């Protein structure tokens, strides 16, 4: 008698019996306990739930990466090159053969490593690689002034004008953990010039942060002199920062080293002429140094002490070793303290002191500086300047003073106007004096300034300065001492 073929139901029962037998055989006798089986079942269920969650997260990540890339235009799809076959032995992803979790995670991590992070907190996009070793950011400034002068007995000084005080564009970035760079070009006073242009290497030395730079870099000289125009509380630096200055100006092409500690720093700079000087004769040489210290540094109080100095050997082509100072606003070239003439100047020495305090929303500081010039014939002339100034943020911001370097920065606006707030409002006052008159052909001047700064956000500032000035220039002799007032407004965007 022929055996009856197994029906489908019998086949399923047979397979089920074999499966149960196999499972029972694979479990040790001790695992037959009902409690152990229940625990194993719960463990398997928990693992399945965890795998399901991981699968969902991976699907979301992969879907996001896929949808983030826009579909190419139809023409690009038509002209796209043919895809190459998959390598032998490598299956294509599918529902039947999905890639492993490890493979999918590795693919996502690799994609994240190749992403570029973009940060807008400084006003312009700063692009940084995923590992943080490469960065690049455009930077610049727009400073537009309007000013009017009245009260002078010299008709040419009573003028109203507008001026592009500074139109600057550049970029900065870093390569690796230690190397950074900066390059800026500027249009100001009807001239185009290179400003900052240097490479810097930051490392550790003697347990502190050290920075070594090569190129054209801003002086480290006084609280105002070491800070940018966009950061000082008034439209212009005080007369110490602007007038007691080497022949090469605010910048010098050379090498600089700075050491930063907790509430102190010291720096040394050796440089030739400004990078924009014509190359018709040999450069001069300037050696400058500055140090600052914060003997008090708490959440409510900061005290600033500083000192600086420089020695310069002037180049043979120097004909004007002293700058004329805009005592009543930079826009008015007819209103300046005369630098006089001092022929064949060959050596110069300058020094200065700084004292300041910062408390909550209040700040105040004073500076003094002096300079001595010596000619080839041994003649000398002395110059001096001083300034006291203070301010108050009505809206509660803290003064943007940086203990790292002892310089001005820009405030962090608590309620930006561009986001519906009031912005930051600062009142400031300054009195300053500069004296070149040890040279019989040079002048002197004083100025009292009241200022209002309105920071719409961290990058935009509107300023108004009212200046009461007095200058005495020996030439022309018919003018002598002159007195008047200047009102200047500025719109500033700095990023």
Image (spheres, rainbow, N blue to C red):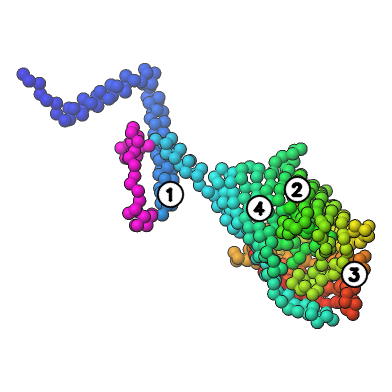
Label 3: how many Cα within 10 Å (few below 14, some 14–19, many 20+): some
The mark nearer the N terminus, 4 or 2, is 4
Q: Nearer the viewer, mark 1 or mark 3?
A: 3
Which SS does the magenta portion mostly show?
loop
Q: Nearer the viewer, mark 3 or mark 2?
A: 3
SS at circle 2: strand
In this rendering, position of residue 261 left or right of residue 441: left
- Measure how far apart labels 4 and 2 are at the Cα level: 14 Å
Residue beneath disc 1: 64
SS at circle 4: strand
Residue beneath disc 4: 182
409 and 363: which is toward the camera: 409
The mark nearer the N terminus, 3 or 4, is 4
Q: Please report contact status of discs 4 and 2: CB closer than 8 Å, yes or no.
A: no
The residues colored magenta run 71-99
Is residue 309 visible from the viewing direction of this image?
A: no
Q: Residue at x 59, y 44 (%)?
A: 133
Residue 413, given in percent of the width and then of the height, sits at: 66, 60
Q: Residue at x 70, y 62 (%)?
A: 230
Q: Please report contact status of discs 3 and 2: CB closer than 8 Å, yes or no.
A: no
Q: Residue at x 62, y 47 (%)?
A: 174
Residue 256 got which mark? Answer: 2
Q: Is residue 75 magenta?
A: yes
Residue beneath disc 3: 441
Image quadrant containing the C terminus: bottom right
Q: Nearer the viewer, mark 1 or mark 2?
A: 2
- Measure how far apart labels 1 and 4 are at the Cα level: 36 Å
358 and 18: which is toward the camera: 358
Q: Nearer the viewer, mark 3 or mark 4?
A: 3
Quadrant in the rendering for residue 335: bottom right
Q: Residue at x 75, y 54 (%)?
A: 252
Q: Please report contact status of discs 1 and 3: CB closer than 8 Å, yes or no.
A: no
């Amino acid at each position: 008698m022929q055996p009856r073929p197994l029906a489908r139901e019998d086949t399923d029962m047979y397979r089920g019996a074999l499966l149960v037998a196999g499972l029972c055989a694979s479990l040790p006798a001790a695992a037959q306990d009902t409690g152990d089986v229940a625990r194993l079942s719960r463990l398997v269920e928990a693992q399945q739930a965890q795998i399901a969650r991981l699968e969902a997260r991976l699907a979301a990540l992969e879907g996001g990466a896929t949808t983030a890339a826009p579909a190419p235009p139809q023409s690009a799809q038509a002209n796209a090159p043919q895809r190459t076959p998959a390598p032998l032995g490598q299956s294509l992803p599918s529902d039947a053969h999905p890639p492993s979790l490890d493979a999918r995670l590795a693919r996502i991590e690799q994609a994240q490593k190749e992403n570029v992070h973009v940060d807008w907190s400084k006003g312009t996009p700063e692009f940084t690689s995923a590992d943080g070793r490469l960065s690049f950011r455009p930077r610049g400034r727009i400073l537009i002034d309007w000013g009017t002068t009245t009260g002078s007995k010299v008709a040419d000084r009573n003028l109203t004008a507008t001026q592009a005080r500074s139109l600057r564009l550049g970029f900065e970035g870093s390569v690796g953990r230690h190397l950074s760079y900066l390059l800026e070009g500027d249009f100001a006073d009807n001239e185009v010039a290179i400003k900052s242009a240097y490479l810097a290497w930051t490392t550790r030395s003697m347990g502190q942060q050290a920075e070594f730079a090569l190129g054209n870099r801003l002086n480290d000289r006084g609280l105002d002199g070491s800070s940018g125009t966009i950061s000082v509380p008034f439209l212009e630096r005080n007369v110490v920062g602007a007038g007691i200055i080497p022949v090469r100006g605010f910048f010098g092409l050379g090498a600089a080293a700075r050491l930063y500690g907790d509430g102190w720093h010291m720096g040394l700079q050796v440089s030739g002429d400004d990078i924009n000087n014509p190359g018709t004769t040999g450069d001069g040489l300037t050696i400058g140094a500055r140090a600052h210290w914060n003997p008090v540094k708490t959440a409510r109080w900061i005290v600033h002490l500083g000192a600086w100095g420089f020695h310069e050997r002037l180049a043979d082509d120097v004909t004007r070793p002293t700058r004329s100072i805009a005592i009543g606003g930079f826009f008015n070239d007819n209103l300046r303290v005369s630098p006089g003439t001092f022929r064949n100047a060959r050596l110069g020495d300058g020094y200065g002191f700084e004292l300041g305090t910062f408390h909550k929303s209040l700040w105040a500081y004073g500076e003094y500086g002096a300079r001595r010039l010596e000619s080839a014939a041994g003649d000398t002339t002395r110059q001096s300047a001083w300034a006291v100034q203070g301010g108050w943020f009505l809206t509660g911001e803290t003064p943007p003073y940086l203990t790292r370097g002892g310089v001005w920065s820009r405030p962090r606006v608590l309620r930006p106007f561009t986001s519906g707030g009031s912005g930051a409002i600062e009142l400031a006052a300054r009195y300053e004096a500069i004296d070149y008159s040890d040279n019989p052909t040079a002048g002197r001047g004083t100025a009292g300034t009241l200022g209002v700064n309105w920071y719409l956000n961290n990058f935009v500032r509107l300023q108004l300065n009212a200046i009461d000035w007095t200058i005495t220039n020996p030439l022309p002799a018919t003018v002598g001492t002159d007195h008047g007032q200047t009102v200047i407004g500025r719109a500033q965007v700095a990023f």
